[in-house]
Amino acid sequence: MRASAATLRGVKNGPSDGMVLGVANAAVIAVGMSALDPHYRLQMATVVFLFGSLPAILTGAALGRLADYLAHAPIWMRRLWLIVPAWGVVTVLGVGVGMAELIAVACIPTTAAALLLEKRTRARSVAPVAVVRR
């Protein structure tokens, strides 16, 4: 038995979207940071990706859950609540590994991922149904 589109409309998938976007964000940051050392590019990308994957998955799931919770809030409020914590995690990780000078650059893909999560989890308005008169 297949589920209809109406049945699936109420399904919230913010945490899974957040985890996928978090891993993608970690991969983009890892590739970007690997450009710093041309001799150990692959090793640098691997280490940065492996170190950042778990925080990215956990943060993505938490922000996805928050995005689902705030689905009907104004867009500016949703963006604020999704971007600021993501920047906080990037800042803590950057300071923790001694790469504070790269925090601002790492916040660029993080902001893009948070904005995409906001858009994907936004509550959709129901389109009005046209009434046909005979």
Image (cartoon, rainbow, N blue to C red):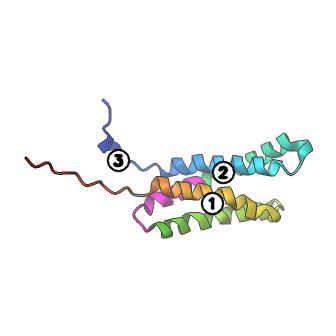
Task: Determine whether, in the image, residue 109 is placed left or right of residue 133.
Answer: right
The answer to which of marks 2 and 1 sits earlier in the sequence is 2
Residues at marks 2 and 1, CA–CA distance in whole angstroms: 9 Å
Task: Determine whether, in the image, residue 101 is placed left or right of residue 14.
Answer: right
- Under circle 1, the secondary element is helix
Q: Which mark is residue 28?
A: none
- Disc 1: which residue: 111
Which residue is at 16% across, 51% downward?
131
Q: Residue furthest left?
A: 134
Residues at marks 3 and 1, CA–CA distance in whole angstroms: 27 Å
Callout 1: 10 Å neighbours few (<14), some, many (20+)?
Answer: some
- State whether residue 105 appears in this view: yes
Eye-nearest disc, 3 or 1: 1
Provide the residue span drawn in magenta: 60-74
Residue 68 location in percent, x, y? Answer: 45, 57
Q: Which mark is residue 9?
A: 3
